[in-house]
Amino acid sequence: MIADMVVEVIHNCADVLGRYTLHVFVVMPNHVHALVSPNMPLPQLTKTLKGFTAKRANQMLARTGNPFWQEESYDHLVRDRAEWERIKFYIEQNPVRAGW
């Protein structure tokens, strides 16, 4: 399943490759939320993560010529602990709000 592959890649990038410290994440049917402390420039991190998972997902789906992820992403710099907690809560509650 594609969601399982995305979860595996998210953990591998944190635990094996050390690209970020992973705090919390959720894989939804059409998007991913993650709260991370990056150890590399965020645009590079996003590009490599989306590129690798897109290639694998398209292989799994036997698709070529169509992008897997949307072009845009929403990146946000967390400025204080209260904001960090709000974002963490938002991510954790995303599946709940969706009825999962």
Image: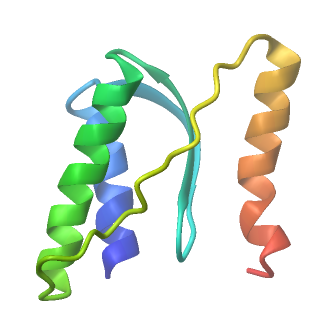
Residue at 40 percent across and 54 percent down: it is 71
Q: Residue 41: percent from the left, percent from the top?
A: 35, 17
**In this image, 65 relative to 87: left or right?**
left
Residue at 48 percent across and 50 percent down: it is 72
Q: Residue 65: percent from the left, percent from the top?
A: 14, 76
Depth check: give the residue in front, 90 or 74: 74
Q: Quarter-wise, where is residue 81 in the image?
A: top right
Residue 12 seen by the camera: no
**Residue 46, above or below 78:** below
Residue at 28 percent across and 28 percent down: it is 44
Residue at the top extreme? 80
**Residue 16, above or below 27:** above
What scheme was used to colour the molecule?
A: rainbow
Residue at 20 percent across and 87 percent down: it is 61
Residue at the bottom extreme? 62
Q: Residue 5: percent from the left, percent from the top?
A: 29, 67
Residue 6 seen by the camera: yes
**In this image, 43 relative to 89: left or right?**
left
Q: Residue 30: percent from the left, percent from the top?
A: 53, 73
Q: Quarter-wise, where is residue 83 in the image?
A: top right
Q: Which quadrant would the N terminus be assigned to in this image?
A: bottom left
**In this image, 19 relative to 21: left or right?**
left
Question: How many callouts does the rendering have?
Answer: 0
**In this image, 63 relative to 93: left or right?**
left
Q: Which quadrant would the C terminus be assigned to in this image?
A: bottom right
**Residue 65, above or below 11:** below
**Residue 48, above or below 38:** below
